[in-house]
Amino acid sequence: MFEIQFKRLIREALDERLLIDKPLPPDIRKDTPQEYEYKADRLKRSNELLAQARLLFDLRSAAAFVPEIWGAWATLLSTDDVEGYAKKQKWWDRFEEARQRERFFHWQLEFPEVFFGEHKGFHVIVGNPPWDKVLPDRQEFYGRYDIFIRALSGNELDQRIGELHQKNPALAGEFKAYENRVKTTMQMLRGGGDFPLSEGRTQAAHEDLSKYFADRSIQVVRHGGSVGLLLPSVFYNGDGCATLRKWLVTEASIASVFGFENRQKIFPIHASYKFVCFVCRKKTPSKRRFPAIFMRHDVRELMGDESVQMVTITAEEVAKLSPESYALLEYRGPRDQEIVHKMYRHSVVLGSDDAAGWRAELFTDFAHKFTYNATRDKDLWTDPATGSLFSPKNVLTNPPTDTTHLVAAMAAEGFVPVYEGKHIEQFIYGIKPFRWWLKKSLAVAKHERPPLDEEVLVYRETASNTNQRTCIAVMLPRGSAASHTLCGVLVRGVDPLAAQTVLNSFCFDYALRLRTAGTHISFTYMRPMPVPPASVTNALPRVPVVCAWEHGVERITELKEHWEGLWIANKAVAKAYGLSQDDFRHVLASFPVFAKKHAEFFAFLTAKLDSQAW
């Protein structure tokens, strides 16, 4: 009904507008005042018709902010006087406020000739959409009142906001209203039906504005038209763009995907930020394949530098390697693609239930079995009587100074230490003092279960593929718990220590770094990862777990007595993946930051690689 109503109005408006360029009626002579009056009347009539359509469009958009509009929607569509009826409603003033504040833009009304002409849509869309996320931003909001607040974070940010509230008590309410508007916008973008290709793989995916611009660009370009956009890296491997990628890979003709890292400060943002120049045509591809390259640094290469070896990616490859997300792997050249394909040929997938697989269960704080959320589960390490955090000082009479004895003493009182991401490195735990002590009885009362009473394999959820290492995993000791910055991995098909060897290997890390986006390792990235079959994994060497406070170190590479074992384990994993000596040399070369930070250990690895027979 709505569609019929607005199409009629726009069609009539377009007819009036088109008359301006058509031959004049017989009774009107050219270059006379009557001609200008006639054309001005056509334009006025067109604008009046479009004003009615624009009001209907604005009402529909504003209904997300003023839900009462939906109660009158049927009448609004059927009445001949939409404005007259709407102005009589109690919600009219709030609608006008939302209309002025949000400034709704309607493509069909702004360009009726394009969308209601003979060939619908633009020939070409070129743009650099915003790279922001649709999330309430305290620094953005309070930055209007204190420009220096953008430099603050954590407790300092909270303290400064508290000071601003004391000076202006109305600010708290204003921020709440701002927060509600942003969340409403997020819900409207996600569930309004206007962006069918922008649905994330999970509802937890952040709402990146860029994907909505990409979605709209595809909508407004005509069949056979071209789209060229500059987009952040989440476009090609982020969870939130899964539906969009699947459509592009299977239904569009992709011309090229050219990715950059901002190391040469192409834009005045962080040097590790990545973005992509993406070009496609809106037509069914004759061959579902396209050229791509990533991690480039010189924009002059876009001019057709023949030294750049592009990688040919097929739709079949994307579906096989990223079946859930259709993420593109960040190949830096054909060699990366060759090695990844070889790894998959000799592997099973981590998230597979195959009998030959690991039978792995990945879990987060939502499972309430070992990991807990620092905000939602703060009550588990907070004394309900005082509101203060439990600590050895207020639990024990004489807290031991030795950490091992301290953990045992707290355990006797029903407490376990909560490990965070900053507490672990590869094969090592306890590198920082504990902030939180979880009381098991509170976990039972709230979640009907205590933390798992066993050694648990975990990995850091927060990590980047430009860090020294990306996958950082360790077996946490029995009698522990973890925060949401660590993800749990329960493996029933392999020895957890053997699984730890694989997750911390350079080879696994190498493959993971090619598919991760941003600073979080979601299950979307982990589940399709290749791992050696269970029988092969169980035959791998084990690297012993190290307790940091007992050895006085923060990285296992600080212990030279472990170097030989680390080399043997990494070599064994590489061979389990079916990689050659040259393949593994290429893998190691992809960790330049690690090589720089741990020069002596890295030199040891390369010397071993060069001197030993494979």
Image: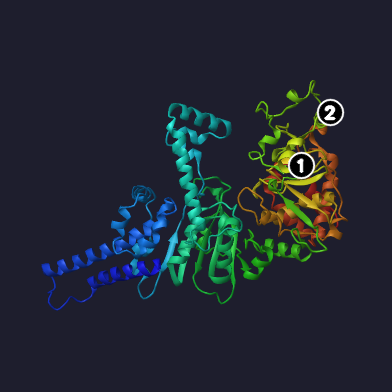
Asked whether, in this view, residue 607 is left or right of residue 309, the answer is right
Which quadrant would the N terminus be assigned to in this image? bottom left
Give the crowd class for mark 2: few <14, some 14-19, many >=20 residues within 10 Å.
Answer: few
Q: Amino acid at mark 2?
A: His
Q: Residue 335, which numbered label?
A: none
Circle 1 packing at 10 Å, graded few (<14), some (14-19), many (20+), is few
Left or right of residue 353, residue 233 in this image: left
Q: Is residue 614 visible?
A: no
Quickly name the residue at label 1.
600
Is residue 606 at all visible to an observer of this figure?
yes
Residue 90: x, y in percent? Answer: 35, 49
For the rendered model, the colour scheme is: rainbow
Q: How many marks?
A: 2
Nearer the observer, 452 or 593: 452
On screen, residue 400 above or below 206: above
Determine which quarter of the picture holds residue 155.
top right
Frontmost residue, 253 versus 490: 490
- Identify the image quadrant of the C terminus: bottom right
- As drawn, the label of residue 405 is 2
Q: Position of residue 58 (x, y in %)?
A: 37, 57
Within the image, what quadrant is residue 199 found in? bottom right
Front residue of 469/195: it is 195
The amino acid beneath tag 1 is Glu
The nearer-to-camera label among 2 and 1 is 2
Q: Nearer the viewer, residue 608 or 136?
A: 136
Would you say the residues marked 2 and 1 are in contact, meaning their CB atoms lie under 8 Å apart? no
Image vertical order of residue 180 relative to residue 307, above or below: above
Please report the residue visible at 52 percent of the width from the left and 49 percent of the height from the top.
133
Residue 198: % across, % down: 53, 60
Q: Position of residue 117 (x, y in %)?
A: 35, 73
Farthest residue to the bottom: give it: 26
The residue most toward the top is 398
